[in-house]
Image: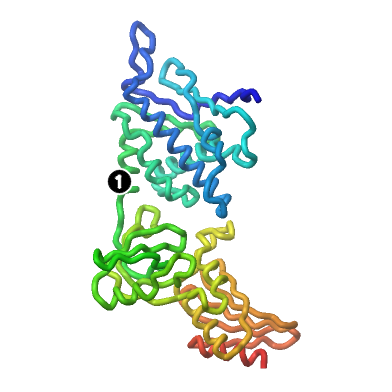
Amino acid sequence: MADEQPDEIRPLRLSGGRFDLTSKGEVVGFPLSAARELARYDDLILDVAKRLWHGDHPSQRQVPRDFEKKVRLQLVDLEKGSVSTVLKAVRAPGPISAGIAGYGDRARALVVTALIAFGAGDGIPREFPPDSLDALARFAKSLQDNEVAILPDEHGNELRYRKADQQRLHQYVAQTRPRSGDVLGLVTAIDPDRGRFTFRLRDGRKVEGHFAGADVEAALHGVTRSRHVAPYVVLDCDYSIDASDRAVAIDAVRSVVEVSRTEDPLAPRLRELAELPHNWDGNGAHPAAIPSLQLAQAILRECDALDAPLPHAFLTHEGGVLLEDQPDLVRWSLEIEPDGEMMIVIAGGGRAPEYGEPSTPAEAASSLKEFYA
């Protein structure tokens, strides 16, 4: 099959300094020392495009075989004046896998949106893939002080991105900030001799942890498993976050508390709720708050101990957990707020609503047991 004719695009223009050199009124040409910027730009777009594809296809580990060929660009011309790179999206011979068209365009638009937002002091938008931040910070690294990269947005406006902007973004991405508190995840490996362990966060990322003391070592040993069977635990610890507020390292573990074991009642559902990301409903919803998850699991264990029917579990928009059951016209609902506050409502079937505020998981489970009595 013959190649389809590729489209010419002009996503990047370089101006000033080396790019405006002329001889007898003619542009000298493109400086080879700056060619790496085109490669950085191409690598950045491919990196973002892959993250977007994985976000749309979370169950698939690899992008389609021809994905890179579809997204990468080729330099086919240089225009006079400030150097405008004319690029083409070149297809490989043969059909392109269904469902991968458009990811290059989406990635290019998102890169410009992120740079505009950062320049306006709004930080990096949440929709920008956090794992692509390093590639974003490297773009324009080799520009000189009197040069500028010009990128058009989807409305035809032009973003002028300078060396100073790149340095500021690099510093922003590189910085880490200390925090102290609770972190939720799985302990998947431990190295006692070095005082280190591997912690898998609920978003799937792995970070290195450091610990000291026999008690902490024993606690970590007790919960270390492969990721498929390891219990979710809460570490009370010191940790570091990056510019996107993601944990990147764990230090000084003070305590280890199990939240959800694979053998717990409704464990698969609670673990599923724990792993829902920010904006899981497409409307700005929060991920599950650690106190609400801890209480939900404790209540379900009490229900199991009392031989009470297990309710259904849902995540609320605010990050709380809703435990609910409705065997007929009457509904029993327990909402656990993100801070751990609990409220029971029994309503429906023409009866006046009943309200309760249990103070312990045992009280909450007893309410459900009585509801079925």
| Image coordinates for residue 344, horizontal then vertical, percent | 58, 84
Callout 1 amino acid: Gln
10 Å crowding of disc 1: few (<14), some (14-19), many (20+): few
In the picture of the structure, the residue carrying the numbered disc 1 is 171
**Is residue 138 in view from this perspective?**
yes
Q: How many numbered tags mark residues here?
A: 1
In the depicted view, which residue is nearer to us: 343 or 63?
63
In this rendering, position of residue 38 left or right of residue 49: left
Quadrant in the rendering for residue 328: bottom right
Query: In this view, which residue lies farthest toward the top?
Result: 24
| Image quarter (top left, top right, bottom left or bottom right) of the N terminus | top right
In this rendering, position of residue 236 left or right of residue 322: left
- Which structural element holds mark 1? helix
| Image quarter (top left, top right, bottom left or bottom right) of the C terminus | bottom right
Is residue 113 depicted above or below 329 in this figure? above
In this rendering, position of residue 164 left or right of residue 244: left
